[in-house]
């Protein structure tokens, strides 16, 4: 039998195993079933495809990919991003970097270096008037620290600490796992038995396909899941888990040694990641979801200027101003919907009518198409896609959907039929990823 997909095509496909729409408990307001999302799992997603999904409100936790129904969730998760080159650090953010650099270099080094390699008047002046993000972020890294021979001691002038940061593959190591457990039990007060190496691996080491295979031998742009490892005097003190996409750096998680909590690694890592985005030309920096009602998340809004993804039009709106004001008064806001409603009163009436009708239903039992989940393709839009020739991976080989027995007679709007399951997946993935993906079922 001739395969319908060659090896090269197969490598460029993302594979999705649909899990469907479910209600779950909410970790923010602690409601039992307040959050509703569409789920799929995958061990093979291309970074470019993930980027397209993120720009449609998706996010991943390990191999689980989900898109929340913001309209029917207690604490709506809004996708946020900023344009890295436009980032303007606040005073407290600049202070955090300067404070860390001072600690790493140490007073003795700073005093002697000022004498042995003094800064020019211009350098001093520009430092006072202007904060150089890239310069500040890298200033205390050991490879950038000037180490002149000190005539007093006849030895190299050494900083107080040797600080190194490297972007490494998302593999598991004992040092990472130990640090992670220390962080979870101390900072998040979790029981030590909660986390085993397999959970750590699932959560933080099984992400997007990574390239290039050997970054030391290639100048190719880094893509996929990476761990940015911070070491002080050779000891691992922090790990930032990053998804690198063609046009964006997405922060997945950060864990650090609680002994260093006073240095504000949340701020330090965000600034470093924005610097990485600027230097390696990933235009956007994604700090994950933004939940307006969650106080703990408000800090994300202090990295400005921040933009929020409209859950319906997928346009990006500034967080500050109109959007933030509206979010203070109601949990679900789509500015594009508001604008549309403002143009015609009939639409507005119709919209509020369908909203109130929707409030009574049990959404888990319904077809996504009847539910009108925001930002999801309609049944007609899915019918316009070529679902018959979508690839299906069964027991290791690809077939077309239409090769399935009875496919043509299956109803698309029945969420229990195979066609219904597949149609819902296509609707939530969107047309771009649909074309470059395959479905995994029956194995
Ligand atoms: Zn909630």
Image: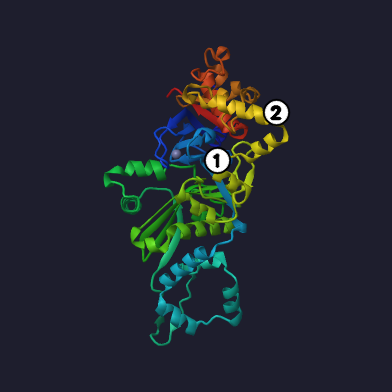
Disc tally is: 2
Callout 2 crowding tier (Cα within 10 Å): few <14, some 14–19, many ≥20: few
The circle drawn on residue 104 is none
Q: Residue at x 58, y 59 (%)?
A: 279
Callout 1 crowding tier (Cα within 10 Å): few <14, some 14–19, many ≥20: few
User: Which residue does the numbered mark 2 point to in the structure image?
Assistant: 346
Q: Residue at x 39, y 63 (%)?
A: 262
Q: Position of residue 377 (x, y in %)?
A: 61, 29
Q: Earlier in the sequence, mark 2 or mark 1?
A: 1
Q: Position of residue 408 (x, y in %)?
A: 58, 14
| Front one among 236 and 53 | 53
CB under 8 Å between discs 2 and 1:
no
Instruction: Provide the secondary structure element on which disc 1 rests.
Output: loop
Residue at the bottom extreme of this rendering = 152
Residue 246 in view in this figure: no
In this view, 297 is above or below 361: below
- Distance (Cα) linking label 2 and label 1: 22 Å
Q: Residue at x 27, y 47 (%)?
A: 192
Quadrant of ligand 1 in image: top left
Q: Position of residue 303 (x, y in %)?
A: 54, 56
The quarter of the displayed image where residue 430 is located: top right
The quadrant of the image that shows the C terminus is top left
In this view, 424 is above or below 161: above
User: Which residue does the numbered mark 1 point to in the structure image?
Assistant: 330
The quarter of the displayed image where residue 425 is located: top right
| Front one among 100 and 162 | 100
| Front one among 368 and 54 | 368
């Amino acid at each position: 039998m001739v395969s319908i997909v060659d090896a090269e095509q197969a490598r460029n496909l993302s594979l999705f195993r649909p899990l469907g729409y479910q209600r779950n408990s909410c970790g923010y307001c602690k409601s039992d079933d307040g959050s509703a999302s569409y789920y799929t799992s995958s061990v093979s997603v291309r970074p470019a495809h993930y980027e397209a999904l993120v720009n449609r409100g998706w996010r991943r936790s390990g191999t689980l990919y989900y898109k929340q129904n913001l309209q029917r969730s207690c604490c709506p998760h809004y996708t946020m991003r900023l344009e890295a080159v436009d980032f303007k650090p606040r005073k407290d953010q600049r202070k955090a970097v300067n404070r860390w650099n001072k600690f790493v270099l140490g007073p003795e080094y700073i005093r002697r270096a000022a004498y042995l390699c003094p800064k020019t008047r211009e350098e001093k002046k520009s430092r006072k008037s202007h904060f150089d993000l890239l310069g500040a972020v890298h200033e205390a890294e050991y490879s950038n620290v000037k180490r002149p021979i000190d005539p007093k001691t006849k030895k190299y002038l050494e900083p107080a600490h040797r600080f190194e940061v490297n972007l490494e593959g998302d593999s598991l190591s004992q040092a990472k796992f130990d640090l992670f457990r220390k962080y979870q039990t101390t900072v998040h007060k979790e029981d030590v038995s909660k986390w085993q190496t397999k959970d750590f691996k699932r959560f933080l080491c099984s992400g997007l396909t990574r390239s290039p295979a050997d970054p030391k031998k290639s100048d190719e742009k880094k893509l996929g899941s990476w761990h940015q490892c911070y070491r002080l005097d050779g000891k691992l003190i922090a790990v930032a888990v990053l998804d690198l996409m063609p046009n964006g750096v997405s922060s997945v998680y950060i864990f650090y040694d609680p002994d260093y909590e006073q240095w504000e690694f949340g701020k330090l890592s965000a600034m470093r990641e924005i610097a990485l985005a600027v230097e390696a030309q990933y235009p956007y920096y994604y700090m994950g979801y933004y939940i307006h009602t969650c106080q703990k998340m408000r800090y994300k809004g202090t990295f400005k200027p921040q933009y929020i993804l409209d859950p319906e039009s997928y346009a990006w709106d500034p967080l500050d101003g109109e959007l933030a004001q509206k979010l203070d008064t109601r949990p679900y806001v789509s500015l594009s919907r508001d604008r549309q409603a403002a143009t015609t009163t009939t639409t507005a009436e119709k919209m509020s009518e369908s909203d109130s009708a929707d409030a009574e239903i049990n959404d888990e039992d319904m077809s996504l198409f009847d539910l009108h989940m925001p930002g999801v393709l309609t049944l007609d839009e899915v019918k316009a896609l070529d679902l018959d020739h979508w690839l299906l991976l069964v027991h290791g080989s690809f077939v077309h959907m239409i090769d399935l027995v009875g496919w043509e007679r299956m109803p698309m709007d029945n969420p229990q039929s195979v066609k219904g399951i597949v149609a819902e997946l296509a609707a939530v993935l969107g047309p771009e990823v649909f074309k470059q993906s395959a479905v995994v079922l029956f194995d």
